[in-house]
Image: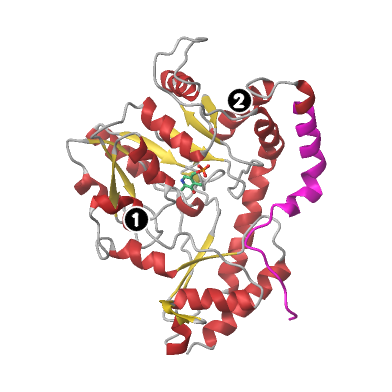
Amino acid sequence: MNFMNVPPFSLNRQLSHIGDELEEAISRVIHSGKYIGGQEIDEFEEAFSRFVGVPYTVGCNSGTDALILALRALEIGAGDEVITCSFSFFATAEAISSVGAIPVFVEIDRKNYLIDIEKIEKAITPSTKAILPVHLFGCPVDMDQIMNLASKYNLKVIEDCAQAAGAKWNGNSVGSYGDIGCFSFFPTKNLGAAGDGGAVTTKHKALASQMRELSVHGMPERYLHTNLGYNSRLDAIQAAILNIKLPYLNKWVGERAKASSNYLEALKGLNDIILPKINLAHGSEHGWNQFVIRIKNFSTKEEDKYVDDNKLQCKNSRDIFKQRLEDYGIKTIIYYPIPIHLQPAYIHMGFQKGDMPLTESLSDEVLSLPLFPEITSDEQEYVAKKIISLAKSKT
Ligand SMILES: *Cc1c(COP(=O)(O)O)cnc(C)c1O
């Protein structure tokens, strides 16, 4: 097969079928003169509530802000502990810390890379206020077990659904189980805006109005401020774009799932390449934001271990494998190379290498293959062929 360039994701390819609709929507907003609030926002919030299966959605500025609004609405703050995991995007813990609370990291489950539910109970203390599970890579956490634990210990539940729009647990959308679901519309998420955007979803009317007020300077009525809040709204242009895209979301997630099953089929049985496991219970659906493989023991050659001319930086097997794929024109991404507990920003928490062995080894091994709804079977075949030839040429 000839050389191909395969991007990790592509937003341009959507434009061939929805580009005109998007331009029309943007132009409609520009001509309406209504840029903050208004009909596009109301329509989107209503449609997204229907999609998730909850009565209330409040749009906001980002997935990170969604988490912050959720924590604040649940009155989680200084000294409170929130149980989550270290194998996630930084914002999960950053949001907890930014309201003054303490992220308590629980190890992940070797099977699915999600929070290890069996280890949550041991992490609960009198200061624990909430569990914040992350549906990482689009894979739904077992929300029945999480909700059982939460009711047993009287804890709140905030779902980080940033990577999982379109995913389901046991027949229901993620974001409909916990007290609050937090979504991101960052462009590379399953439902992406043309910029930043986010939303919170909830069954509880009081929480919804609390989050709405917090998102507008803690202001329940004009120029009356009952809380210190934020300026975090979803703006009208982003809402208009999301209104065009939302009806395609299920189709796109289906195409991601199809592409993922192609990879699973093409890559099975390779030594040292671990594929994602997808034994989801009946009624559950993976959102497939990422197709993540793990590379173990790829190269032991001394000269491979160093970044070309810079002999200072030692590379692991996964990094070498990633470089080889890049030489073939295949771009992959590492989500995430440094676990949150070892980030410099959390140095004050006193964690050390070895504190979360599973999370740390995953950070060294994971690699996200090119995945997006419009990826072609030729591209996938090319990626699979190159991975197979690399795996077999292992040194
Ligand atoms: C993207 C992401 C966020 C933050 O969303 P933004 O819209 O970028 O602020 C939070 N948590 C997870 C797991 C994410 O992937």
The amino acid beneath tag 1 is: Pro
Q: Is residue 45 visible?
A: yes
- Residue to which mark 1 is pinned: 344
| Residue 141 is inside the magenta segment | no
- Residue 313: image x %, image y %? 43, 76
Q: Mark 1 Cα within 10 Å, few/some/many (few <14, many 20+)? A: few
Which three-letter amino acid code belongs to the residue tagged 2? Glu
Q: Position of residue 193 (x, y in %)?
A: 64, 41
Predominant SS of the magenta segment:
helix
Which residue is the extreme one toward the left? 126
Q: What is the CA distance from the residue labelled 2 to the residue labelled 1?
A: 40 Å
Position in image of residue 150 (x %, y %)? 29, 36
Taking the image as shown, residue 210 lies to the left or right of residue 13, namely: left
- In the rendered image of this protein, does residue 369 appear above or below residue 284? below
Q: Secondary structure at mark 1?
A: helix
Q: Few, some or many C-alpha atoms within 10 Å of disc 2 (few <14, some 14-19, many ≥20)?
A: some
Q: Are marks 2 and 1 in contact (CB under 8 Å)?
A: no
Q: Of marks 2 and 1, which one's residue comes earlier in the chain?
A: 2
Q: Secondary structure at mark 2?
A: helix
* Whether residue 380 is situated above or below residue 350 in the rendered picture: below
Q: Quadrant of the N terminus?
A: bottom right
The residue that label 2 is drawn on is 46
Snapshot quadrant of residue 132: top left
Find the magenta span and give its range. 1-29
Across and down, in percent, residue 156 comes to 32, 32
Q: Is residue 140 above or below residue 292?
A: above
Please tell me in which quadrant of the rendered image residue 124 appears.
top left
The one of 108 and 6 positioned closer to us in this rendering: 6
Tally of numbered discs? 2
